[in-house]
Image (spheres, helix red, strand yellow):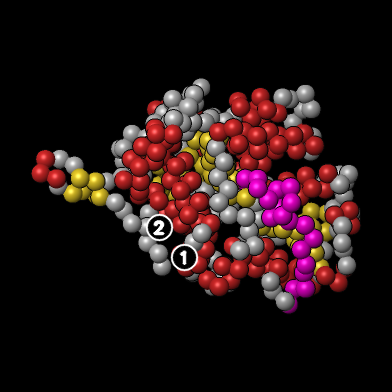
Amino acid sequence: MAVIPRRRLMVGLGGAAVVAGAGLWGWRDRQRRSGVLSAGPELDGQPHQIDLSWPSAPTSILFNLAQQQGFFARYLLDVRLTGGGVTGRDAIGDLQAGRSRVVVAPVLSWLDRLHEGEVQARLVMGLQAGTFRLLVRRRLKLSRVEDMVGRRIAITNPDMADRLFFSVVLRRKGMNPDTGPQWRVLAPQDMAGAIRAGDVDALAVHDPLAWRLLNDPSLGVVELVNSVNGLYAQRTNLALGVARDMLDQDPAAAAALVVALQDAARWLKTHIPETASLLAGHIEGMEPDAIIAMMRHEVLGICPTGHDFRVQLAQYVDEMKLLGRFPDTLDSAGYARAISTDLLHRGAVVP
């Protein structure tokens, strides 16, 4: 397994060597030389503890990589999981309850909660492309999204982003996602049995569960549509949100977390086998070879910030309008700016 080296900085009289945040200082120097260092919060070179909520973090490829391969430690971060729950709404609830100050959740979940006006947080970066997959029974010979009218689609939770994502897909095809298909809530462990018995016609899920079900020959399912190809392939699925009080009081910690996750996401793209080995035993029913195969059918390294991130947020806002969750009169680009903060680039400020 590849191990990321930690450079040693020579500090103090006599040239004593101590372990320090070399990655942090290297990033800061590169940003200064390139002229894009944030005019707002900077990395301060100090250790920080971060209480983070991240749904299903134990099986998250990116979280495990950042934690186990030392990307958090490189930027002097002590990242502690607090809650996280199963859905994005669960994790955002942790922030509202004060159990965490930083949350990773699907963009669609964030937009739902932020629009309610009760969440005091800003979105600062995107994390990884979506891996949503709509799996249908092969014997039904369904070939178009429009064929899902009247079909029974299983989801693991009505608050999961899976349903919102496929609702957008259905709406784009002219269907009413609330009355077209029949949504059925099933526990993850019950999905295989339900599809095998014919109790449902399709499964709306995401990796790693989706990949495991797709590759189970006893289920006889095929992939009808996904977010891995086409329009959504390069769009972030998750967003990192930070409590407003943390942005006011400790912006350097938030900035360091953004940079650490960016580094991890970019390293991931070219180190698939090493990353898969980190997940051994973390994902039920999947050995490293299966994890490698799954990762090679996903889009890796997605981590937008700044303008690129705001553009993607605005695209999601447009889609929430399609679902009737946001008013058509809302300025999508303006709203994306209002709910986000750029911690890294010149001219960035924390409102």
Which residue is identified by label 2? 69
In the image, taking residue 230 as reference, residue 121 lies left or right, namely: left
Check residue 196 in the rendering and tell me which mark sits there, or answer none: none
Where does residue 58 sit, x and y in percent of width and height? 49, 58
Q: Secondary structure at mark 1?
A: helix
Give the residues drawn in magenta, as a range: 218-237
Q: Nearer the viewer, residue 99 or 30?
A: 30
Residue 239 on the magenta segment: no
Disc 1 residue type (three-letter):
Glu
Q: Secondary structure at mark 2?
A: loop
Q: Nearer the viewer, residue 118 or 48?
A: 48
Q: Residues within 10 Å of mark 2 (few under 14, many from 20)?
A: many
Q: Quadrant of residue 115?
A: top right
Quarter of the picture holding the N terminus = bottom left
At horizontal 74% and vertical 31% (from top left) the residue drawn is 326
Disc 2 residue type (three-letter):
Gln
- Looking at the image, can residue 310 be seen? yes
Q: Residues within 10 Å of mark 1 (few under 14, many from 20)?
A: some
Q: CA distance from mark 1 to mark 2?
A: 10 Å
The image shows a total of numbered marks equal to 2
Residue furthest toward the bottom? 218
Tell me, yes or no, whether the two marked residues, 1 and 2, touch with CB atoms within 8 Å: yes
Which residue is identified by label 1? 274
Where does residue 333 sit, x and y in percent of width and height? 68, 28
In the image, taking residue 350 as reference, residue 30 lies left or right, namely: left
Residue 231 on the magenta segment: yes
At horizontal 29% and vertical 51% (from top left) the residue drawn is 7
Q: Quadrant of residue 107?
A: top right
In the image, taking residue 240 as reference, residue 6 lies left or right, namely: left
Q: Nearer the viewer, residue 98 or 7?
A: 7
